[in-house]
């Protein structure tokens, strides 16, 4: 009986860890994309200012 509960607990912990890892991974990607967009906005503003 307790073997099944232990296995269930391990599976739940692994699922939570995978979910948290995915969250942090996508969060970092979003930050990088946001940085790139800011750089592109600055370049566009510079181009508009040069014309």
Image (cartoon, rainbow, N blue to C red):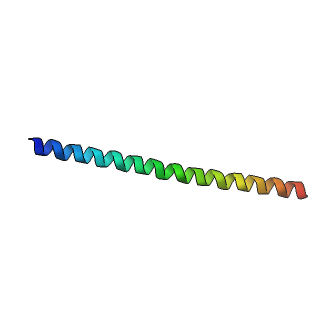
Where's the N terminus, which quadrant? Answer: top left
Of 48 and 7, the residue lying toward us = 7
Residue appearing at x 38%, y 47% in the figure: 19
Q: Is residue 44 left or right of residue 16?
A: right
- Counting labels gives 0
Residue at the limit of the structure toward the left, as seen here: 1
User: In this view, which residue lies farthest toward the right?
Assistant: 51
* Residue at left offset 75%, top offset 52%: 41
Q: Residue at x 61, y 54 (%)?
A: 33
- Residue found 84% across the figure and 58% down from its top: 47
Write down the quadrant of residue 6 in the picture. top left
Q: Is residue 15 left or right of residue 30?
A: left
Where residue 2 sits: x, y (%)? 11, 41
The image shows residue 15 at horizontal and vertical percentages of 31, 47
Image location of residue 26, percent across then percent down: 50, 51
Which quadrant is home to the C terminus? bottom right
């Amino acid at each position: 009986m307790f073997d099944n509960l232990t296995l269930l607990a391990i599976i739940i912990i692994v699922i939570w860890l995978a979910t948290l890892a995915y969250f942090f991974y996508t969060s970092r990607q979003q930050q990088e994309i946001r940085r790139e967009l800011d750089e592109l906005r600055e370049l566009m503003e510079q181009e508009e200012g040069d014309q």
